[in-house]
Image: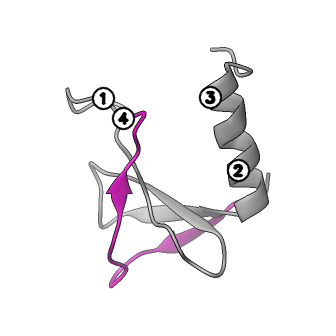
Amino acid sequence: MTESPIRNPGLTGWRKSSYSNSEGGSCLEVLDGQPGGVPVRDSKNPDGPALVFPATGWSSFISAVKTGALHA
């Protein structure tokens, strides 16, 4: 999967991933509906860079997470 880092000033509508926990750890935010791919950022650093993944690669990653195909 090829990702591209971007700065994200002015991008609005970020949502916290349903896989992020409520204790403040593993906080990932995703921005839906972007034509260039799927921006992802660390919610603890909202002014920092975001990575933009191709939509097909992001879908494959999410499917693998949901099915347990990825191992720590």
Image quarter hosting the C terminus: top right
Q: Position of residue 59 (x, y in %)?
A: 70, 50
What's the residue at 29%, 61% (across, down)?
46
The residue that label 4 is drawn on is 20
What's the residue at 74%, 21% (across, down)?
69
Name the chief secondary structure element in magenta.
loop
The residue that label 1 is drawn on is 21
Of the image marks 3 and 2, the number of the one nearer the N terminus: 2
Of the image marks 2 and 4, the number of the one nearer the N terminus: 4
Give the Cα separation between the discs numbered 1 and 4: 4 Å
Around disc 1, counting alpha carbons within 10 Å, would you say few (fewer than 14), some (14 to 19), or many (20 or more)?
few
The range drawn in magenta is 3-19
Q: Secondary structure at mark 4?
A: loop
Viewer-side label of 3, 4: 3
Q: Which one is in front, 13 or 4? A: 13
The residue that label 3 is drawn on is 66
Q: Secondary structure at mark 2?
A: helix
